[in-house]
Image: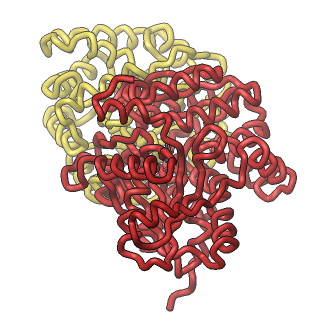
C-alpha cells in the first residue's frame, strides 16, 4: 500500500496539483498574484478573518444550508436514498456567493476599490455584484455576448445591483472569452482592481482559495449527514463546470475511502458527437487561463468551441485539482447530455417542488442513474448547486413558449 | 553566439537602435506573411517577431486579437509558423526571427519536438507570453541545448527581486513591457519607462528592448532614447486589418511605409 495522500497538502508551495495548476500568466500579473497569495496565507488561519467570513455566511448568506432528504424522488427512482445539499437556498440562489463573500473580504484586505468578474450563467456575476454593492465597490462583470442573450434575467439583476455588464464579442462569445477579457482588464487596472474569479480555475492561488471558501459545503454536509443518518454518504454527486461547487462538496470527503465521488460534466449533444463541454471525459492536458489542466482543443492546441445547454458548464477547461483527482482515480468524472439534464430538471421540479439550475440538473440526472444501481439503504448526496429561476426562459424556449 | 546576440551587438557597436517588428503569421492571408517579413527587413527591421496565432490571446488588445482571428480562419498552426521561418531562411540568413505566442500550442506540440523543428528551420528565439520563468524551466532547458534564446518579459509591476532573477535566466535580450495593459494600449509614459529601464540595467548587460504602446516615429524615438531598441506590433497588425482585400504588394507597401517612418524616428537618435 502507498502512503495515504494528504489532500490538504495540495496545492504545493508553487501552486501545483501534481502536473496541474501553476501560474501561467503574463509577467504583469505575477506581482499581483504574489501579493494575493501572501495576503491569503496571512489571513487564512487568522481567527478574525475566519470569524468575519463565518459571520457573513451565517447572517448574510443564510448558512448552514439544509441537507434535504428527497423522499418522493427517492421513491420514484426506487433505489438509494437521495439527499440534496440545498445551495440553491443561499442568498442569490447558488453556491457562488460562498466564494464571492470570501474574495470580497480579501479585496478589502488588499485595499483595492474596484472588483471585476467573469460570468457564464450569470450566477457568479450576480454574486459578485451583490458583494460589491454591499461593500460600496465599483463592479464590472464580463460576460460572453451569447450568454448575455441566454441569461438575460441575470444580466438585468446585475445591472439592478449597480454593476456594469460588458458583453464580450470575441471568440466563441461564452465563458472562456469572458475570462480572457477579465484578464485583460486586470492587466490594465491591476493597481486598483481585485479580480474575483468564479471557479476553482485561473492561476495559483485562485484554485486554492476558491476551494477553501467553497469547502463550507462539504464540511456542513458531512456533519449533517452524520447527524441525520448516523453515517457518511455512500456517494457524492456534483456538476462540474470549472468545478467549484464540486470541489467544495468533495474536498472534506476525499480521505473517506468508503465514499464514492462523481463529478458530472456537460455532455451537450453527446460526448461522442464532439459537441459538449466535458474536458475530463474527452480532453487532453494543456494550458489555459493561468493553469495546466484538461482542455478541449484541436490537434494544433487551439481551444475549441464547447456546447452545453447550460451556460455555467459551457467551458473548455476545468479546475486543476479536478484534473489531478481524475488522474489519481479518486473522483470519477462522467457526462450527462442536454436532454438528460432537461428531464432531470422537470423531474425534480414536479416531484419535489424544487426547480434546479440547468447546471445542477446535470448532477441530478446522474444521481438518478446512480440511485437506480444502488441498494435502498445507501445514501447519495447531491450538491444542489443553484436554483433554476434564471433558466426559465431557456426552458420555455425549448417548450416553444413565449414568456 | 546566437543570431539575436550578434545582431544586437552590431546595433550597439554602430549606435543603431534596434527595431523589432511583430506581425501574426497567416494574417490576413497565409501567402502574405513571407513577403511581409522580407518587406519589413528591407524597410529597416532588425529582428522579426512572428506571432503564433492562438484562440485565446489573453495579453493582446483588440487589434492583435483580430489578427489572430484572421489567421486562424486559415488554420495557421505552430508547425506552419516553423516551416514559414524555414522558407524565410532560404533567402535571409541574417535577420533573427523570434516566435511569440502562448503556451498551449507549444504544449500540444511538445517542447522537444518544437525545439528540434524550430532549430532546424532557423528560428532564433521564443517568447511565450503566459510562461513566466517559474513555469518555463523545462522549456528553457530544451531550447538552451539547441542554442535557441528564451525571451522573458519584465513589466512595470515586476519587483526588483524578480528583475534580478528573470535577467539571470534570460538570453538574447530582455523585453520590457512598457505599460500595464494589453498590446496596443494607448497610455505610454516615457518617463516611467526610462526609470524602470534604468532599474533593469543595474541588473543586466543584456540588450533591453521595449514594446507595447509604440506606434509611430515619435513614440519610437521617445522610448528608443532610453533602450537598445523598440518592438512595434499593433500598428502593423492594424494595417493588415485595414488591407484584408488588398493585394500582397499593396499590403507590403503599407508595411514598408510604417516601418520606414519608425526607422527614421529611431535613426534620428544616432
Ligand atoms: C448553479 C450553478 N452550478 C454550477 C455552476 C458551475 O460552476 P462550478 O463548476 O464552478 O461549480 C454554475 C456556474 O455558473 C452555477 O451557476
Of all residues, the one furthest to the bottom in this rendering is A1
Q: Residue at x 47, y 38 (%)?
A: B173
Chain (yellow): B
Tell me where residue B123 sits by quadrant: top left
Of all residues, the one furthest to the right in this rendering is A48
Residue A60 placement, left or right of B189: right
Residue B111 placement, left or right of A38: left
Q: Residue at x 39, y 65 (%)?
A: A77
Instruction: Indicate the position of residue A191 as horizontal and vertical percent values.
Output: 68, 29
Q: Residue at x 49, y 70 (%)?
A: A81
Tell me where residue B86 sits by quadrant: top left
Residue A3 placement, left or right of A324: right
Instruction: Indicate the position of residue A182 as horizontal and vertical percent values.
Output: 52, 31
The C terminus of chain A - image quarter = top left
Q: Colour of chain A?
A: red
- Viewer-closest of B200 and A330: A330
Instruction: Indicate the position of residue A212 as horizontal and vertical percent values.
Output: 66, 57
> How many circles with numbers are drawn on the protein?
0
Q: How is the image coloured?
A: by chain
Q: Residue at x 50, y 65 (%)?
A: A82
Can residue B179 be seen? Answer: no
- Viewer-closest of A366 and B51: A366
- Viewer-closest of A78 and B57: A78
Instruction: Indicate the position of residue A112 as horizontal and vertical percent values.
Output: 73, 31
Can residue A365 be seen? Answer: yes
Amino acid at each position: 500500500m502507498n502512503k495515504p495522500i494528504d489532500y490538504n497538502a495540495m496545492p504545493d508551495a508553487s501552486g501545483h496539483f501534481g502536473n496541474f495548476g501553476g501560474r501561467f500568466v503574463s509577467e504583469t500579473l505575477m506581482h499581483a498574484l504574489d501579493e494575493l497569495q501572501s495576503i491569503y496565507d496571512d489571513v487564512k488561519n487568522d481567527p478574525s478573518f475566519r470569524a468575519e467570513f463565518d459571520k457573513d455566511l451565517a447572517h448574510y448568506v443564510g448558512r448552514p444550508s439544509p441537507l434535504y432528504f428527497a423522499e418522493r424522488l427517492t421513491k420514484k427512482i426506487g433505489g438509494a436514498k437521495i439527499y440534496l445539499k440545498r445551495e440553491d437556498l443561499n442568498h442569490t440562489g447558488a453556491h457562488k456567493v460562498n466564494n464571492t463573500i470570501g474574495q470580497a473580504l480579501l479585496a478589502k484586505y488588499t485595499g483595492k476599490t474596484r472588483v471585476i468578474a467573469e460570468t457564464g450563467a450569470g450566477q457568479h456575476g450576480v454574486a459578485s455584484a451583490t458583494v460589491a454593492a454591499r461593500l460600496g465597490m465599483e463592479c464590472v462583470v464580463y460576460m460572453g455576448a451569447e450568454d448575455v442573450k441566454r441569461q438575460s434575467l441575470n444580466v438585468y439583476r446585475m445591472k439592478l445591483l449597480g454593476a456594469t455588464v460588458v458583453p464580450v464579442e470575441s471568440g466563441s462569445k461564452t465563458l472562456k472569452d469572458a475570462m480572457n477579457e477579465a484578464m485583460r482588464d486586470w492587466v490594465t487596472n491591476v493597481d486598483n482592481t481585485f479580480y474575483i474569479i468564479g471557479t476553482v480555475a485561473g492561476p495559483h492561488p485562485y484554485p486554492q482559495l476558491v476551494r477553501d471558501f467553497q469547502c463550507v459545503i462539504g464540511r456542513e454536509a458531512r456533519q449533517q449527514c452524520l447527524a441525520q443518518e448516523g453515517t457518511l454518504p455512500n456517494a457524492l454527486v456534483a456538476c462540474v463546470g470549472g468545478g467549484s461547487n464540486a470541489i467544495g462538496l468533495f474536498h472534506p470527503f476525499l480521505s473517506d475511502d468508503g465514499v464514492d465521488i462523481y463529478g458530472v460534466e456537460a455532455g451537450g449533444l453527446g460526448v461522442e458527437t464532439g459537441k459538449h463541454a466535458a474536458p475530463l471525459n474527452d480532453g487532453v492536458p494543456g494550458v489555459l487561463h493561468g493553469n495546466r489542466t484538461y482542455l478541449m482543443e484541436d490537434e494544433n492546441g487551439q481551444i475549441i468551441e464547447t456546447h452545453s445547454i447550460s451556460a455555467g458548464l459551457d467551458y473548455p477547461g476545468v479546475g486543476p485539482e479536478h484534473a489531478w483527482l481524475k488522474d489519481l482515480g479518486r473522483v470519477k468524472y462522467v457526462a450527462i447530455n442536454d436532454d438528460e439534464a432537461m428531464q432531470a430538471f422537470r423531474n425534480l421540479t414536479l416531484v419535489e417542488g424544487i426547480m434546479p439550475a440547468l447546471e445542477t440538473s446535470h448532477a441530478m440526472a446522474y444521481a438518478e442513474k446512480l440511485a437506480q444501481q444502488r441498494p435502498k439503504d445507501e445514501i447519495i448526496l447531491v450538491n444542489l448547486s443553484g436554483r433554476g429561476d434564471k433558466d426559465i426562459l431557456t426552458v420555455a424556449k425549448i417548450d416553444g413558449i413565449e414568456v | 553566439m546566437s543570431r539575436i546576440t550578434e545582431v544586437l551587438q552590431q546595433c550597439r557597436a554602430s549606435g543603431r537602435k534596434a527595431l523589432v517588428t511583430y506581425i501574426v503569421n497567416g494574417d490576413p492571408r497565409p501567402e502574405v506573411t513571407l513577403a511581409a517579413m522580407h518587406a519589413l527587413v528591407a524597410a529597416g527591421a532588425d529582428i522579426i517577431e512572428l506571432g503564433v496565432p492562438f484562440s485565446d490571446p489573453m495579453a493582446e488588445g483588440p487589434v492583435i486579437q483580430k489578427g489572430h482571428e484572421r489567421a486562424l480562419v486559415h488554420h495557421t498552426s505552430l508547425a506552419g509558423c516553423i516551416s514559414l521561418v524555414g522558407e524565410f531562411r532560404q533567402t535571409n540568413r541574417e535577420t533573427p526571427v523570434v516566435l511569440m505566442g502562448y503556451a498551449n500550442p507549444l504544449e500540444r506540440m511538445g517542447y522537444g519536438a518544437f525545439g528540434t523543428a524550430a532549430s532546424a528551420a532557423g528560428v532564433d528565439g521564443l517568447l511565450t507570453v503566459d510562461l513566466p520563468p517559474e513555469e518555463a524551466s523545462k522549456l528553457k532547458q530544451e531550447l538552451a541545448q539547441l542554442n535557441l534564446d528564451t525571451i522573458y518579459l519584465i513589466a512595470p509591476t515586476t519587483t526588483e527581486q524578480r528583475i534580478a532573477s528573470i535577467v539571470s535566466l534570460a538570453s538574447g535580450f530582455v523585453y520590457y513591457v512598457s505599460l500595464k495593459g494589453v498590446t496596443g494600449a494607448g497610455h505610454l509614459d516615457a518617463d516611467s519607462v526610462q526609470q524602470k529601464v534604468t532599474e533593469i540595467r543595474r541588473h543586466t548587460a543584456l540588450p533591453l528592448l521595449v514594446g507595447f504602446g509604440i506606434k509611430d516615429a515619435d513614440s519610437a524615438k521617445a522610448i528608443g532614447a532610453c533602450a537598445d531598441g523598440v518592438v512595434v506590433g499593433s500598428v502593423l497588425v492594424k494595417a493588415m486589418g485595414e488591407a484584408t482585400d488588398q493585394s500582397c504588394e499593396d499590403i507590403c507597401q503599407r508595411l514598408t511605409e510604417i516601418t520606414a517612418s519608425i526607422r527614421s524616428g529611431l535613426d534620428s537618435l544616432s
